[in-house]
Image (cartoon, rainbow, N blue to C red):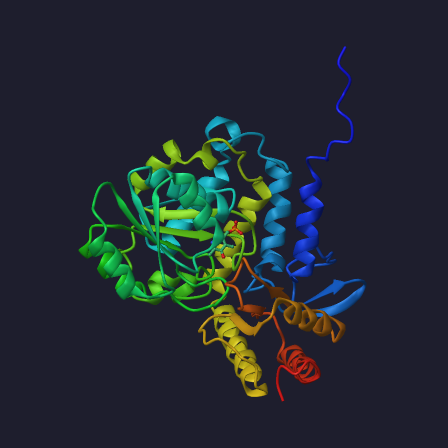
Amino acid sequence: MSSPPTAVADPLDFLQEELTSLVRRGLYRSLREQAGEPAGSVAIGGRKVILLCSNNYLGLATHPWVKEAAKQAIDTYGAGSGASRLVSGNSELYQELEERLARLKGTEAAIVFASGYAANVGTISALVGRRDAVYCDRLNHASIYDACLLSRADIKRYPHGDTASLERLLRNSPIRGKRLIVSDGVFSMDGDIAPLMELVRLAEEYSAILMVDDAHGTGVLGDNGAGTVAHCGLEGRVPVQMGTLSKALGGLGGFVAGSQTLVNYLVNKARPLIYSTALPPPVLASCVAALNVLEQEPQLQNKLAENAVFLRQGLFGLGFCVLNSQTPIIPVVIGDPHLTMQASEALLEEGVFVQGIRPPTVPEGKARLRVTVMATHKREELSRALEAFGRVGRRLGLIR
Ligand SMILES: *Cc1c(COP(=O)(O)O)cnc(C)c1O
């Protein structure tokens, strides 16, 4: 009988080593518990603080119609869906939700996935493969990059928003298989809007498929929150429009809107849709209700835009390095990750919850406070938040 080897290194030792390295570089992440609803204020550590880092832009996650719809759906359909949509999880609520999303986006059809992440992974890996090429804005969301890797297509990155570079890539790369251009509509960490007009032109000129990820534009931009494509007046010219139900719509899920053929194709080919369980009925019902609110309370969108202008101008006026954006995403760039987290902690002590965003979510040297505003914030809350920013900014030497 052979004896077990003695004193071998634990093969999981690298876990603690990597975590220690993250702490040293100021990049360690941990989960912070939050109590109560994601409304204008939340409770953290038993204290009420102003919430300035939620993507629940319109406050729909806590809207009474939305909450009521979820409760009723549980009574009617139960709490869970029990299987993948292609097996036995395809609740009739999906059809209503998909019809409504297609109407919102002005497309023939739409298909709902379990999350925006799953929608990107499923769609991109179904559209392109080994011999194809994907053209990606450098600041596209991580889920797009993961999707591209999974697809095994050749990934060609172009500098953020630089359509001249994109055109050079398109002109100079040999055409073998299909070409897909994919871009965030509103960039998640910078809040700026993609140069969609140019992307449409290039896609048409070079026979590329164009896909826009409108996670942050849906519900926020365009008439009735139709999104970035409508905001840019490009209805009918972006064949693959992805979006999420988990941000301005306050629920959970991702979707793709486009032609009926595209939807039929994804039902057959998108693996996250085929091999993962359907969304729970209360989630589907609450998303339908959120779309009702979107149609019937357009003033929420206006309030959101007003609040964004107020907070952006306030932060700019204090002297912070605020990136220029036209959305509720207001990035305050600090640069150093340690200092960014120090600012986030100091703001929390002052009663304002803003999350620090560090590499690899944003490029090296571009750590920032990603401030997001909501339609439900009261002016008085935003003024108090600005005062706190002023005190913390001066104390840490970020502003004078
Ligand atoms: C949040 C986000 C996603 C993922 O959506 P989820 O519904 O949260 O999974 C995809 N793309 C972008 C640009 C995002 O900001």
Question: Can you name the residue that lies furthest to the bottom here?
Answer: 400
141 and 300: which one is in front?
A: 141
Residue 268 against residue 390 in the figure, above or below: above
Residue at 79% over, 62% down: 45
Question: Can you name the residue that lies furthest to the right here?
Answer: 46
Quarter of the rendering containing residue 171: bottom left
Residue 352 against residue 80 in the figure, above or below: below
Q: Position of residue 331 (x, y in %)?
A: 53, 71
103 and 19: which one is in front?
A: 19
Q: Position of residue 233 (x, y in %)?
A: 29, 66
On the question of residue 96 being in view, the answer is no
Residue at 70% over, 74% down: 347
Q: Position of residue 374 (x, y in %)?
A: 57, 69
Question: Can you name the residue that lies furthest to the left here?
Answer: 205
Question: Can you name the residue that lies furthest to the top here?
Answer: 1
146 and 260: which one is in front?
A: 146
> In the picture provided, is 304 more to the left or to the right than 49?
left
Q: Quadrant of the C terminus?
A: bottom right
Q: Quadrant of the N terminus?
A: top right
Residue 140 against residue 195 in the figure, above or below: above
> In the picture provided, is 81 more to the left or to the right than 275?
right
Quarter of the rendering containing residue 154: top left
On the question of residue 332 being in view, the answer is yes
Q: Position of residue 53 (x, y in %)?
A: 61, 65
Quarter of the rendering containing residue 61: bottom right
The image shows a total of numbered marks equal to: 0
> In the picture provided, is 396 more to the left or to the right than 362?
right
